[in-house]
């Protein structure tokens, strides 16, 4: 068992991790960090903290950093979480997005921080079930996460009861097949309609691919960031959005403190943040 | 079904672009230049230079964020002149950004402003110092309360001290009442500080 880090090493590690991922751990989270770090150091046979840091920093494949990141993220999620925001999407936001567009035009929605996929699949189901204009537009759904392990599960699309508890039974029956008792797989048509990718939202090079997005969902992710990380994420979203595009944050998260870039918009179901026209 | 198959998505390909310039006519390019400059020591001066002339809010935000990310004494120092800016948005952006930088780096840059010739700058400096978790915070603010000739500066320091809530500040506050016996705001704010300090013995006493 590796000894816990001394305070300077702990700081150095947290600074490194925050710089790379936005994830911010304070002293209060020491137990969480120490345990995972010790586990990885033992697994790779690192002799010292410094050896391990060098591996994280300089390993060409980035494999160990990815393993560590996978351990450091919190991936809790479920279908129809904070459903009022999904209601807002289909009742208000999308109608505004398509105003002035022609039938057949594209609409792009991105779930940034999708974890095991429940959020983007929920969006897809809400569109199909509740957005009256769904057949008039070509809708592209993107979903990404920094954690490669959860992405794989998102692509597989197999869920247990706990993830489905908010979903009406009729919708489970309509969009899933029970592959063994207590395990359901989402239908292929939905799996194939979502473009999953590994993206760190504070890395400009990785976010560069996302352009002209109409709605970004970034829920329950920025709570793990500090102020600077939130600010950097906000500027990445600003670049990725089309003019007048929306950001949807988790219920306890707000952009007002974090960025002067967006305008809060109050809709009947929820508040979204909007990029100005220009 | 109107959901497009993932493989058929139409996101434009990312083109390997040339390095962007902070002086480009297109704000998107200036923002990109600012993102690229984050964390780079040699970029502090050009970023600050552009910030002084920049009037696009999104580019300002990108520059400020980049300087916070750099987080060095030079980056903090480069933001200091903006505390005297007439432009409220820019000034507030600078204050907020300094608050997000490491206190150990910011404090030596901001502390001298507590004796600046402009009382408005001293007010912003007192507010900022109040937000920096740093061991010098308490003595600096009590120093302002005891010595600053301008009552509004003293009140800004009192407000910050009330937030910190350390009872060691009380004697200085009492002396402030003696210095400005006729100012109702001084009497009122010191009274509320007394309350705050005595009511709340469980407060974290770390200054
Ligand atoms: C608690 S889950 C939230 C999932 C879903 N959005 C929801 O609200 O239910 C947060 C997710 O954010 C991801 N995450 C954390 N930092 C990230 C980053 N820098 N870039 C992309 N994803 C990140 C984590 O891996 C995790 O899967």
Image (cartoon, rainbow, N blue to C red):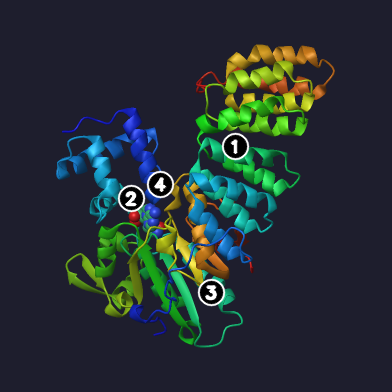
- Residue furthest to the right in view is B182
Q: Quadrant of residue B23?
A: bottom right
Q: Give the residue pinned by disc 4.
A: A19
Q: Give the residue pinned by disc 3.
A: A94
Q: Is mark 2 within 8 Å of ligand 1?
A: yes
As drawn, the label of residue A74 is: 2
Q: Quadrant of residue B112?
A: top right
Query: Marks 1/2: CA distance?
Result: 37 Å
Q: Is mark 1 within 8 Å of ligand 1?
A: no
Query: Marks 2/3: CA distance?
Result: 29 Å
Q: Quadrant of ligand 1?
A: bottom left
- Identify the mark nearer the N-term, 3 or 4: 4
- Identify the mark nearer the N-term, 2 or 4: 4
Residue depicted at 30% across the width and 39% down the height: A33
Query: Marks 1/4: CA distance?
Result: 22 Å
Q: Quadrant of residue A244?
A: bottom right
Q: Give the residue pinned by disc 1.
A: B77
Between A188 and B5, the one lying in front of the other is B5
Residue depicted at 62% across the width and 26% down the height: B111
Q: Nearer the viewer, mark 2 or mark 4?
A: 4
Residue depicted at 33% across the width and 69% down the height: A196
């Amino acid at each position: 068992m590796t000894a816990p880090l001394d305070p300077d090493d702990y700081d150095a590690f947290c600074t490194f991790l925050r710089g790379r991922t936005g994830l911010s751990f304070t002293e209060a989270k020491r137990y969480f960090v120490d345990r995972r770090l010790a586990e990885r150091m033992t697994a790779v046979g690192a002799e010292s903290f410094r050896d391990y840091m060098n591996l994280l920093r300089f390993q060409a494949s980035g494999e160990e950093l990815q393993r560590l990141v996978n351990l450091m993220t919190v991936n809790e999620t479920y279908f129809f979480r904070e459903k009022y925001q999904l209601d807002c999407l289909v009742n208000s936001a999308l109608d505004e997005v398509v105003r002035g567009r022609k039938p057949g035009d594209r609409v792009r929605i991105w779930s940034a921080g999708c974890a095991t996929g429940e959020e983007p699949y929920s969006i897809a189901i809400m569109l199909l079930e509740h957005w009256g204009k769904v057949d008039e537009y070509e809708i592209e759904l993107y979903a990404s996460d920094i954690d490669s392990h959860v992405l794989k599960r998102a692509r597989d699309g197999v869920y247990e009861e706990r993830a489905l508890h908010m979903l009406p039974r009729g919708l489970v029956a309509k969009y899933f097949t029970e592959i063994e008792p207590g395990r359901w797989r989402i239908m292929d048509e939905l799996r194939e309609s979502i473009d999953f990718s590994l993206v760190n939202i504070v890395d400009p090079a990785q976010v560069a691919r996302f352009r002209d997005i109409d709605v970004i969902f970034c829920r329950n992710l920025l709570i793990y960031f500090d102020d600077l990380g939130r600010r950097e994420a906000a500027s990445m979203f600003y670049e990725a959005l089309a003019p007048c595009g929306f950001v949807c944050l988790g219920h306890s998260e707000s952009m007002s403190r974090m960025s002067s870039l967006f305008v809060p918009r109050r809709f009947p179901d929820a508040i979204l943040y909007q990029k100005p026209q220009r | 079904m109107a959901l497009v198959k993932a493989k058929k998505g139409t996101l434009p390909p990312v083109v390997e672009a040339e390095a962007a310039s902070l002086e480009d006519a297109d704000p998107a390019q200036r923002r990109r230049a600012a993102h690229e400059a984050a964390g780079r020591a040699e970029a502090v001066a050009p970023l600050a230079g552009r910030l002084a002339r920049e009037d696009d809010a999104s580019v300002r935000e990108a520059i400020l964020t980049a300087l916070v990310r750099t987080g060095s004494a030079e980056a903090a120092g480069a933001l200091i002149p903006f505390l005297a800016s007439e432009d409220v948005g820019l000034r507030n952006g600078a204050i907020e950004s300094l608050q997000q930088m490491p206190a150990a780096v910011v404090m030596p840059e901001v502390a001298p402003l507590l004796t600046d010739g402009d009382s408005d700058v001293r007010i912003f400096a007192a507010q900022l110092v109040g937000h920096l978790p740093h061991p010098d915070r308490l003595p600096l603010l009590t120093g302002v309360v005891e010595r600053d000739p301008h009552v509004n500066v003293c009140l800004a320091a009192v407000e910050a001290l009330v937030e910190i809530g350390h009872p060691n500040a009380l004697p200085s506050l009492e002396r402030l009442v003696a210095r400005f016996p006729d100012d109702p705001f001084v009497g009122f704010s010191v009274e509320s500080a007394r309350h705050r300090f005595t009511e709340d013995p469980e407060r974290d006493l770390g200054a």
